[in-house]
């Protein structure tokens, strides 16, 4: 009997992060292409609308032209006999010839304009169909890439170690602050895992002297999304959202007690609005607060 096939080795954390970074760049590019395609689609729809309006006018002009041609035909009949009844050498009267020329010119001009407008409307519609297909294709590529990102992120989260002091019943043993940073081992692990998982643009503050909350107990960290006292940029708001979501997703593994972000608190069962404390920092609009058991 042949030996069982050897299972492919699982990717390392470094390899997963490399894949994740590559896919995130791909998604950013696809988002840019998607928005550009949407803009092109809006322009094409405007062009189609204008072409259809011109076509509607052309059709109205056609009705008017038919009426005018009918009037010309009546005048022509009164002015001369049908050309088929003319004897060799006979010519139409100048008035009849003029009327026939005007009739022919009017019909030729109308036919040309109607064709141009109909072609313009058809071309605009064809362009919309093509751009719509491109937009749908780009959107599907983006969704596929984001699905892969989610899968890789799940694999990375699976590598996060269990916070120290977790009990068999799911609870957490009390911990005292240690080290020069004066925070608990669980808090330190959470802080380092977030610093490893995300590119932070501002400072992280954990222990501080206070008479309330988890900070003086070494059981909380604030991840700044701005320099402090000012609202974060859209990029950093998105980063704050990701950090808050990550902490809540991994709360049972790390020992996260609750997260506060943008004047809301979440113990793991959903966001709840908090009272107004009076300022950007006090209301946690410029930083993500994570408290630990």
Image (cartoon, rainbow, N blue to C red):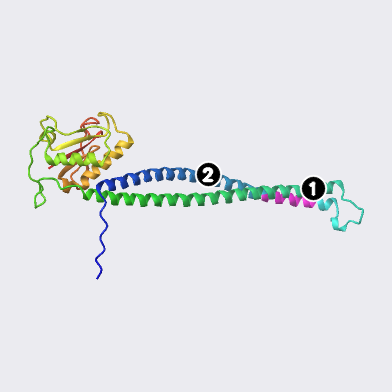
**Local SS, label 1:** helix
Residue at 32% across / 37% down in the picture? 235
The residue beneath circle 1 is 101
Figure quadrant of residue 197: top left
Q: Residue furthest right?
A: 89
Closest to the camera, between mark 2 and mark 1, is: 2
In this rendering, the answer to whether 91 lies above or below 275 is below
Q: Earlier in the sequence, mark 2 or mark 1?
A: 2
| 64 vs 14, nearest the viewer | 14
100 with respect to 254 (left or right)? right
| 157 vs 33, nearest the viewer | 157
Residue 252 image position (x, y, % from top left): 16, 48
| Quadrant of the drawing holding the N terminus | bottom left
**Which secondary structure dominates the residues rendered in magenta?**
helix
| 285 vs 236, nearest the viewer | 236
Figure quadrant of residue 277: top left
10 with respect to 67 (left or right)? left
Residue at 82% across / 46% down in the picture? 98
In this rendering, the answer to whether 267 lies above or below 233 is below
Residue 287 image position (x, y, % from top left): 23, 35
* Magenta-drawn segment: 62-75
Magenta residue check for 5: no
The residue beneath circle 2 is 46
| Quadrant of the drawing holding the C terminus | top left
Magenta residue check for 63: yes
Q: CA distance from mark 2 to mark 1?
A: 38 Å
């Amino acid at each position: 009997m042949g030996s069982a096939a050897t299972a492919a080795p699982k990717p390392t954390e470094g390899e997963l992060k490399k894949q994740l970074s590559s896919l995130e760049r791909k998604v950013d590019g696809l988002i840019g292409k998607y928005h550009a395609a949407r803009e092109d689609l809006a322009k094409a729809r405007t062009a189609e609308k204008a072409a259809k309006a011109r076509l509607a006018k052309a059709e109205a002009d056609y009705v008017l032209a038919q009426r005018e041609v009918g009037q010309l035909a009546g005048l022509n009949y009164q002015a001369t006999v049908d050309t088929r009844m003319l004897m060799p050498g006979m010519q139409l009267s100048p008035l009849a010839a003029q009327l026939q020329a005007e009739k022919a010119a009017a019909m030729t001009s109308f036919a040309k304009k109607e064709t141009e407008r109909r072609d313009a409307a058809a071309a605009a519609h064809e362009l919309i169909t093509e751009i719509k297909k491109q937009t749908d294709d780009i959107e599907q590529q983006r969704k596929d890439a984001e699905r892969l990102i989610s899968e890789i992120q799940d694999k990375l989260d699976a590598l996060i170690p269990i916070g120290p002091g977790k009990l068999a019943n799911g609870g957490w043993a009390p911990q005292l602050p240690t080290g020069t940073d004066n925070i608990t081992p669980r808090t330190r692990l959470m802080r380092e895992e977030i610093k490893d998982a995300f590119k932070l643009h501002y400072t992280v503050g954990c222990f501080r002297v206070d008479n309330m909350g988890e900070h003086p107990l070494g059981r909380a960290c604030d991840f700044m999304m701005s320099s402090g006292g000012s609202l974060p940029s859209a990029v950093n708001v998105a980063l704050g959202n990701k950090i808050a979501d990550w902490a809540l997703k991994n709360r049972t593994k790390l020992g996260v007690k609750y997260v506060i972000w943008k004047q809301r608190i979440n113990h793991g069962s959903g966001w709840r609005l908090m009272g107004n404390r009076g300022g950007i920092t006090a209301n946690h609009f410029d930083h993500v607060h994570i408290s630990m058991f």
